[in-house]
Image (cartoon, grey):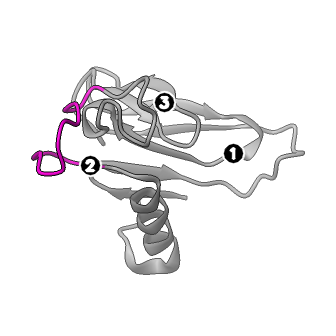
């Protein structure tokens, strides 16, 4: 199951962690071409292809939540070592701020059937 709510793309599978069968996700044009992405659950870097799509494996059926690195605040709470967004200096900075609470709330909102299913 792939759920898209820009700038987030959540990928879920039911193959189970003990399955020898892996899942290879191929999602077309979800991001900007060659955009640097981050799986916010593992902080792994992913690069969108020349058309903005992603083609990535899901090891052991683990979920993935991809967001542009520019959406993540440098020095913030979510993947600060790979974030490329605005560095936090004060509470009133403009820009997208992503925290674990936002990621969790967004994921639950869309898993419960209110999001756009891709």
* Residue 87 screen position, x and y as percent: 22, 30
Q: Which quadrant is home to the C terminus?
A: bottom left
Q: Which residues are magenta?
A: 84-97
Task: Identify the residue under disc 2.
Answer: 97
Would residue 58 be found to the left or right of residue 98 on screen? Answer: right
How busy is the neighbourhood of tag 3: few (under 14 within 10 Å), some, or many (20 plus)?
few
Q: Earlier in the sequence, mark 3 or mark 1?
A: 3
Q: Quadrant of residue 84?
A: top left
SS assignment for the magenta stretch, majority: loop
Q: Are marks 3 and 2 in contact (CB under 8 Å)?
A: no
Residue at screen point 35% across, 29% down: 83
Q: Earlier in the sequence, mark 2 or mark 1?
A: 1
Eye-nearest disc, 3 or 1: 1
Q: Are marks 2 and 1 in contact (CB under 8 Å)?
A: no
* Residue 39 screen position, x and y as percent: 49, 37
Q: Nearer the viewer, residue 74 or 23?
A: 74
Residue at screen point 39% across, 79% down: 114
């Amino acid at each position: 199951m792939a759920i898209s709510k820009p700038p987030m793309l959540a990928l879920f599978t039911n193959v189970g962690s003990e399955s020898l069968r892996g899942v290879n996700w191929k999602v077309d044009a979800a991001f900007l071409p060659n955009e640097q992405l981050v799986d916010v659950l593992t902080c792994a870097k992913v690069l969108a292809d020349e058309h903005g799509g992603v083609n990535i494996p899901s090891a052991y059926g683990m979920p993935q939540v991809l967001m542009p690195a520019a959406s993540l605040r440098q020095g913030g709470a979510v993947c600060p070592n790979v974030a490329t967004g605005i560095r936090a200096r004060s509470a009133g900075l403009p820009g997208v701020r992503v925290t674990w609470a936002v990621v969790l709330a967004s994921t639950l909102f869309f898993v419960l059937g209110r999001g756009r299913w891709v």
